[in-house]
Amino acid sequence: MNILHICSTYPPDIGGTATSVPCLAGEQAKLGHNAIILTHGNPAFSVENNISIYRCGKTTSGIKSISAGLKKSTMMGILGRRIIRQHKIDIIHAHDPNVSAITKLIIDPRGKIPSVVKYSGDLAWETLGLKSRKYIEDPERFWTSKEAKTILFIENIIFSRFDRIIAQNNYQKDMLINHVKLREDKISVIPNGIMIHKYTKKEIKIAENELPASKTRLCSAARLVPWKGIEDIIEAMKGIDADYIIFGDGPEKDRLIELARKKGVSKKVFFFGKVPNEKMQLYMGLCDLLIVPSIYEPFGIVILDGFAAKVAVIGSNTGGIPELISKNMLFSQKDVREINGKIIYALNNQKKIIATQDEKISRYAWKDIALEMQATYMGISRKRRN
């Protein structure tokens, strides 16, 4: 089977899509499929791990505006048309409902090729809702707004051009049904997977020396934006005898640094900066607790990284997080007292928490997910033929 994966981010970019697509495509190549990647950046063509990678050239980094996203889609779409002329593509797999989905519509406007689109996050919420703190604090207010309804209408039209929509969990499935108004029988729930990395003693020693020499280390790994909830943990640190290491960067960094200073915890809050995907588990594994305090989190692949690193994980009771983390490891957003108590509880029960996580992580092997995706592709192709 010739599979064309369309993704707006791919290594050396970082993020959920850039992490998951190489893993899925790599497993598909092992199964004997021809996995082809269409993305942006340079070089124009390369082959890595038996995966053919086509890049349309450097475009705007990230999706900072609708116009920037459309420019990226257009450039990728022009290259994609050349790819389908060169290869007999059996299935198109778009990996987000905006840039990649629109690229697919440019490549195959008449829908002749069977296709699936991954619901990596909601177009309306991620382009408009997350830009306003009032909506972050009250999401239901956003879903009833005129702006949201307009984008959801457009999103519904985009999804109608695909044979199947892949939700990562039941939270996303409910979003698709309740907000985008899709039929349940058009949705498949297939989660992200996780690759477990192994590190040498030398790599571990180097990483250990880069981290603060603390008796107890707490950490979070996230882009520093308002909806990641990092400020809640900074506030909670006043009552915790530990250091808090933040892996990641972003526009909120200066504000968070100032918040730590105002709260009197700047001496135990460390802004480490970006960490490559393949090294994330290395640094997490040297910490005692991973905290995922997101206000918005469609899936939470960082949680699986924590499971793989064998570090205890706690998180906010929002989005897809409760489907990964046990109920007693969840805390309410903005409730600093509850967060404080959950941190202390987790630090005192690390072995028990990690044992539970070890049982869960076996469900997220990329090999099994690739087989499940293969069955979905074949089901769509059979339906088309019939």
Image: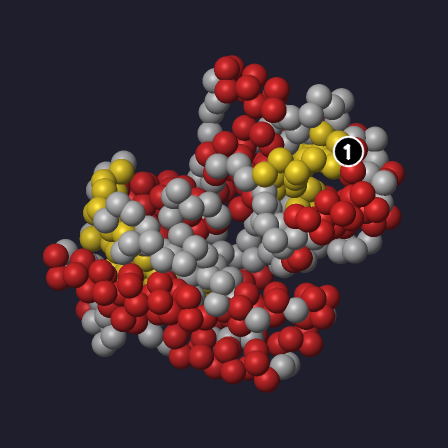
Task: Residue at 36% x, 58% y: name it.
Answer: 59
Task: Residue at 53% x, 36% y: name it.
Answer: 275
- Could you tell me which quadrant the C terminus lies in? bottom left
User: In the rendered image of this protein, does residue 298 appear above or below residue 114?
Assistant: above
User: In the rendered image of this protein, does residue 355 appear above or below residue 19?
Assistant: above
Task: Residue at 29% x, 63% y: name it.
Answer: 75
Residue 344 is situated, as x and y percent measured from the top left of the image, at: 81, 36
Left or right: 369 in relation to 326: left
Task: Residue at 42% x, 71% y: name it.
Answer: 67
The residue tagged 1 is 268
Left or right: 282 in relation to 353: left
Q: Secondary structure at mark 1?
A: helix
User: In the rendered image of this protein, does residue 302 appear above or below residue 240?
Assistant: below
Residue 147 is situated, as x and y percent measured from the top left of the image, at: 57, 81
**In front here: 217 or 161?**
217
Residue 374 is situated, as x and y percent measured from the top left of the image, at: 31, 52
Count residues near mark 1 (Cα–Cα under 10 Å), then give few for <14, some for 14-19, many for 20+.
some
The answer to which image quadrant residue 138 occupies is bottom right
Residue 161 is situated, as x and y percent measured from the top left of the image, at: 33, 74
